[in-house]
Amino acid sequence: MPTRPSKVTLDTNALNILNAIRNNASNNYKDYVPPITDVSELKQIGKIIMDVPALQNEFLSALVNRIALVTVTSKMFDNPWAMFKKGFLEYGETIEEIFVDLVRVFEFDAETAETELFKRVAPDVRAAFHVMNYKKFYKVTIERAKLARAFLSAGGMGELITYIMNSIYVSASYDEFLTMKYLLARNILNGRLYPVSIPAVSEANMKSIVTQIKGTSNLIEFPSRKYNPAGVFQHTDKADQYIIIDTQFDASMDVNVLASAFNMDKADFMGRRVPIDGFGNLDNERLAELFADDPSYVEITDDEKEALNAIPLALVDEKFFMIYDNLNEFREVENGQGLYWNYFFHQWKTFSTSPFSNALLYVPTEPSVTSVTVTPETATVSAGSSLALTTTVVTTGFAPQTVTYESNNAGVTITEGGVVQIASDATGTATITVKSTFDETKTDTVAITIS
């Protein structure tokens, strides 16, 4: 079961740090290093520690692994999108998300009860798997000279912690936020957020835009298959809705007006308002470094960034992001020849989104489906075998790229992923119709001959 780590307040007072380390140190460390009661004793304590290499190693290891880790773990949850994280996954690397769709309804008929009683009716159970897909580490070097300076003043210890942590914390925090933004942008480009057309934003039409936002926010409180990628019967209560809002649009929008659209007072609404510095404002250079060895990474082009940056806001269910921490761990190694220590901070995470959660996108254009194309157009398939179809959906305005499949032969079925399965006793021919979920007038067909 995922857990959310609680924040810990770190006291960077040098005396408290030194005594905390000593209290949890080895007996050998305690024999050499006395408790400290006054700042004037700092240099003396520092000399004792610096004169014995074993004490240096134990002191610095305890400092990083006990205090620095608390700092990183706590501050990582200052990420402006932290509310979307689901917590720490202590065991395993895979999350199975299960959704059970509507159950069939039957007409009561006493005459058929005795023949229908023991027939099976399987529930429509959907599952999505979210797998750990992010294993990164950060490296920082602490030199002996820097360690020695920590004991020269009362603020030296805090300075050392800052020296250790800043490069790690800033990098890890930035990379987490950047990856979350890339994940959202990729989902938008892949048509996984349902688009709502709004006029180009201006001061004159703010009121009408707010009306549209309020209308769709109210609408997704009612169950529908329309607003989630899986097409399941889903709804999102007001309390579970988050608005991801472009900072420029946010600056021109009256927060009180927008809050009233969600039937919330300003204080409550601010907790549901998630700022973004442009949906297309992505650091491609850093992303390329982060995912250099990931074959699934696709760089977002300048044209795509421009289109993304025209988006003023999105409205998502709190369960839309499936983001977990899997590992936060420090390790260290001493280089005796160079008189320095290398510290490594490992972060493993799961970045994914739920196909069962509602997500809306407000776009200043008219979303449309240009075409649906499926290959092969014709095929001869033997009974008892299968055939994988490839479907391409061309869209504009971030329209959904999802499709449905229909067969006119009871012996020929097709999965949600587009795999045609021919029953062993199937005969004749079958026509598979592929239809856009966003625009049902856009279709294509596959003619299958069963051999």
Image: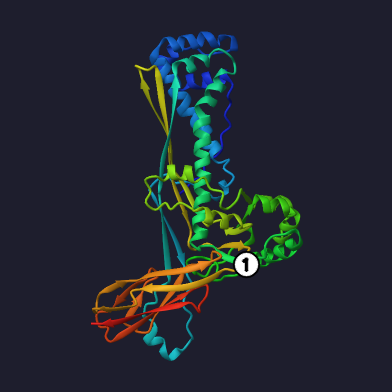
What secondary structure is marked by label 1? strand
Amino acid type, label 1: Ser
Compared with residue 366, is residue 165 higher up or lower down, i.e. above or below? above
Quadrant, the C terminus: bottom left
Give the farthest residue toward the bottom: 111
How many marks the image carries: the answer is 1
Compared with residue 354, is residue 232 higher up or lower down, i.e. above or below? below
Give the farthest residue toward the front: 303
Position of residue 13 measured from the top left corner of the image (x, y, whole percent): 59, 21
Quarter of the image for residue 424 reads: bottom left
Sort mark 1 into few (<14), some (14-19) or many (20+) by Cα contacts within 10 Å: some
Nearest the eye: 236 or 290: 290
Position of residue 383 measured from the top left corner of the image (x, y, whole percent): 24, 79
Nearest the eye: 344 or 20: 344
Q: Residue at x 42, y 63 (%)?
A: 127
Compared with residue 161, is residue 149 higher up or lower down, i.e. above or below? above
Nearest the eye: 174 or 85: 174
Compared with residue 177, is residue 215 higher up or lower down, i.e. above or below? below
Q: Is residue 301 left or right of residue 432?
A: right
Position of residue 319 measured from the top left corner of the image (x, y, whole percent): 53, 56
Give the labeled residue for mark 1: 197
Q: How is the image coloured?
A: rainbow
Position of residue 376 measured from the top left corner of the image (x, y, whole percent): 33, 74
Q: Is residue 86 visible?
A: no
Q: Is residue 266 visible?
A: yes
Q: Residue at x 52, y 72 (%)?
A: 438
